[in-house]
Image: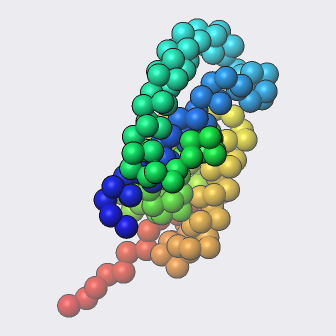
Amino acid sequence: MNEEEKLGIRLAKIHGQMLGELERLDKPPKRLLRLITDREAYEAAAPAREERRAAILEALPHLAYVVKMLNPDWDHAAAKPIRPREPNRGIPPQGVAGTAMDIIKETTQPLTIAEIVDLLGERFGYDLSTVAERQRYHTAVNNGLMNTYRQDLVEHPGSPTRWSWRVDDEED
Protein backbone atom coordinates (compact mmCIF):
# COMPACT_ATOMS: atom_id res chain seq x y z
CA MET A 1 0.00 0.00 0.00
CA ASN A 2 1.52 3.29 -1.06
CA GLU A 3 1.38 6.58 0.83
CA GLU A 4 -1.50 7.98 -1.25
CA GLU A 5 -3.68 4.97 -0.45
CA LYS A 6 -2.87 5.27 3.25
CA LEU A 7 -3.72 8.97 3.16
CA GLY A 8 -6.97 8.20 1.34
CA ILE A 9 -7.94 5.67 4.01
CA ARG A 10 -7.12 8.12 6.80
CA LEU A 11 -9.09 10.92 5.14
CA ALA A 12 -12.04 8.57 4.56
CA LYS A 13 -12.01 7.84 8.30
CA ILE A 14 -11.96 11.56 9.08
CA HIS A 15 -14.88 11.98 6.66
CA GLY A 16 -16.81 9.33 8.61
CA GLN A 17 -15.97 11.01 11.92
CA MET A 18 -17.22 14.35 10.59
CA LEU A 19 -20.43 12.67 9.39
CA GLY A 20 -20.87 11.18 12.87
CA GLU A 21 -20.29 14.53 14.55
CA LEU A 22 -22.79 16.18 12.18
CA GLU A 23 -25.32 13.45 12.97
CA ARG A 24 -24.79 14.06 16.70
CA LEU A 25 -25.22 17.82 16.25
CA ASP A 26 -28.41 17.40 14.20
CA LYS A 27 -29.95 14.80 16.47
CA PRO A 28 -28.41 14.70 19.96
CA PRO A 29 -29.21 11.68 22.14
CA LYS A 30 -32.41 12.02 24.16
CA ARG A 31 -30.60 11.33 27.42
CA LEU A 32 -28.32 14.28 26.72
CA LEU A 33 -31.31 16.58 26.34
CA ARG A 34 -33.30 15.15 29.26
CA LEU A 35 -30.68 14.46 31.89
CA ILE A 36 -28.35 17.38 31.39
CA THR A 37 -27.47 18.90 34.73
CA ASP A 38 -26.92 22.44 33.50
CA ARG A 39 -29.55 23.19 30.86
CA GLU A 40 -28.56 26.88 30.65
CA ALA A 41 -24.97 25.98 29.77
CA TYR A 42 -26.17 23.57 27.09
CA GLU A 43 -28.45 26.19 25.56
CA ALA A 44 -25.71 28.83 25.79
CA ALA A 45 -23.42 26.56 23.74
CA ALA A 46 -25.94 26.46 20.86
CA PRO A 47 -24.12 29.12 18.77
CA ALA A 48 -20.86 27.17 19.04
CA ARG A 49 -22.63 23.99 17.94
CA GLU A 50 -24.16 25.82 14.96
CA GLU A 51 -20.73 27.20 13.99
CA ARG A 52 -19.27 23.70 14.12
CA ARG A 53 -22.18 22.33 12.08
CA ALA A 54 -21.64 25.00 9.38
CA ALA A 55 -17.89 24.29 9.29
CA ILE A 56 -18.51 20.56 8.85
CA LEU A 57 -21.07 21.13 6.09
CA GLU A 58 -18.59 23.38 4.31
CA ALA A 59 -15.66 20.95 4.67
CA LEU A 60 -17.38 17.66 3.79
CA PRO A 61 -17.59 18.15 -0.01
CA HIS A 62 -13.93 19.21 -0.18
CA LEU A 63 -12.82 16.27 1.91
CA ALA A 64 -14.91 13.88 -0.20
CA TYR A 65 -13.29 15.28 -3.36
CA VAL A 66 -9.76 14.71 -2.03
CA VAL A 67 -10.59 11.18 -0.83
CA LYS A 68 -12.08 10.39 -4.25
CA MET A 69 -8.89 11.67 -5.92
CA LEU A 70 -6.72 9.42 -3.74
CA ASN A 71 -9.04 6.42 -3.87
CA PRO A 72 -11.24 6.32 -7.02
CA ASP A 73 -13.13 3.26 -5.72
CA TRP A 74 -14.39 5.13 -2.65
CA ASP A 75 -18.12 5.92 -2.65
CA HIS A 76 -19.10 8.84 -0.43
CA ALA A 77 -22.75 7.75 -0.49
CA ALA A 78 -21.78 4.45 1.14
CA ALA A 79 -19.63 6.15 3.81
CA LYS A 80 -20.95 5.42 7.28
CA PRO A 81 -20.84 7.93 10.12
CA ILE A 82 -18.46 7.18 12.97
CA ARG A 83 -20.07 8.29 16.21
CA PRO A 84 -17.96 10.59 18.38
CA ARG A 85 -16.82 9.31 21.75
CA GLU A 86 -18.85 10.20 24.76
CA PRO A 87 -17.34 12.58 27.30
CA ASN A 88 -15.33 10.68 29.93
CA ARG A 89 -15.04 7.70 27.61
CA GLY A 90 -11.54 8.39 26.44
CA ILE A 91 -9.14 5.70 27.55
CA PRO A 92 -5.77 6.82 28.91
CA PRO A 93 -2.78 5.85 26.72
CA GLN A 94 -1.68 2.99 29.02
CA GLY A 95 -5.26 1.98 29.79
CA VAL A 96 -6.98 2.61 33.09
CA ALA A 97 -5.00 0.00 35.02
CA GLY A 98 -1.64 1.03 33.56
CA THR A 99 -2.29 4.67 34.34
CA ALA A 100 -3.41 3.77 37.87
CA MET A 101 -0.16 1.87 38.33
CA ASP A 102 1.79 4.92 37.06
CA ILE A 103 -0.04 7.07 39.64
CA ILE A 104 0.87 4.63 42.42
CA LYS A 105 4.52 4.63 41.33
CA GLU A 106 4.66 8.44 41.31
CA THR A 107 3.36 8.90 44.86
CA THR A 108 5.31 8.47 48.05
CA GLN A 109 2.45 7.38 50.32
CA PRO A 110 -0.05 4.51 49.93
CA LEU A 111 -3.30 5.41 48.15
CA THR A 112 -6.86 4.12 48.26
CA ILE A 113 -8.65 3.22 45.03
CA ALA A 114 -10.84 6.34 45.46
CA GLU A 115 -7.74 8.56 45.70
CA ILE A 116 -6.31 6.93 42.57
CA VAL A 117 -9.60 7.63 40.75
CA ASP A 118 -9.46 11.28 41.86
CA LEU A 119 -5.90 11.65 40.54
CA LEU A 120 -6.86 9.89 37.30
CA GLY A 121 -9.77 12.30 36.87
CA GLU A 122 -7.53 15.32 37.46
CA ARG A 123 -4.89 14.06 35.05
CA PHE A 124 -7.29 13.43 32.15
CA GLY A 125 -10.00 16.00 32.91
CA TYR A 126 -12.78 13.50 33.61
CA ASP A 127 -16.00 14.77 35.15
CA LEU A 128 -16.45 12.51 38.17
CA SER A 129 -19.32 14.46 39.70
CA THR A 130 -21.85 11.64 39.34
CA VAL A 131 -21.79 8.47 41.39
CA ALA A 132 -22.13 6.35 38.24
CA GLU A 133 -19.00 7.82 36.60
CA ARG A 134 -17.01 7.55 39.82
CA GLN A 135 -18.09 3.95 40.30
CA ARG A 136 -17.24 3.06 36.70
CA TYR A 137 -13.65 4.25 37.09
CA HIS A 138 -13.39 2.84 40.63
CA THR A 139 -14.37 -0.60 39.32
CA ALA A 140 -12.01 -0.34 36.34
CA VAL A 141 -9.05 0.68 38.52
CA ASN A 142 -9.77 -1.95 41.17
CA ASN A 143 -10.22 -4.79 38.67
CA GLY A 144 -7.19 -3.74 36.66
CA LEU A 145 -4.91 -3.52 39.67
CA MET A 146 -6.14 -6.76 41.21
CA ASN A 147 -6.05 -8.77 37.98
CA THR A 148 -2.95 -7.37 36.30
CA TYR A 149 -0.67 -5.73 38.85
CA ARG A 150 -1.51 -7.49 42.14
CA GLN A 151 1.98 -9.00 42.46
CA ASP A 152 3.52 -5.53 42.12
CA LEU A 153 1.47 -3.96 44.94
CA VAL A 154 1.78 -3.86 48.72
CA GLU A 155 -1.50 -3.94 50.63
CA HIS A 156 -1.56 -1.70 53.70
CA PRO A 157 -4.09 -2.78 56.34
CA GLY A 158 -6.93 -0.52 57.32
CA SER A 159 -10.26 0.58 56.05
CA PRO A 160 -10.25 1.46 53.23
CA THR A 161 -7.31 -0.58 52.02
CA ARG A 162 -4.38 1.44 50.77
CA TRP A 163 -1.97 0.32 48.08
CA SER A 164 1.62 1.16 47.26
CA TRP A 165 4.16 -0.06 44.76
CA ARG A 166 6.33 -3.01 45.78
CA VAL A 167 9.93 -1.89 45.44
CA ASP A 168 12.33 -4.81 45.36
CA ASP A 169 15.62 -3.76 46.92
CA GLU A 170 18.51 -5.06 44.86
CA GLU A 171 21.47 -5.89 47.03
CA ASP A 172 24.95 -5.68 45.53
Horizontal side of 105 relative to 114 (left or right) equals left
In the displayed structure, would residue 144 be above or below residue 112?
Answer: below
Residue located 58% across and 35% down the image: 19
Quarter of the picture holding the N terminus: bottom left
Q: Which quadrant of the structure image shows residue 39? A: top right
**Quarter of the rendering occupied by the C terminus:** bottom left
Q: Is residue 74 above or below residue 125?
A: below
| In the image, farthest residue toward the left | 172
Location of residue 20 in the rendering, given as x and y in whole percent from the top left corner: 61, 37
Q: Is residue 162 left or right of residue 168?
A: right
- At x 25% / y 88%, what residue is drawn? 171
State the count of labels. Answer: 0
Image spot of residue 31 (x, y percent):
78, 29
Residue 62 in the image, given as x and y percentages of width and height: 42, 31
Q: Is residue 15 above or below residue 108?
A: above
36 or 43, which lies in front? Answer: 43
Closest to the observer, 75 or 141: 75
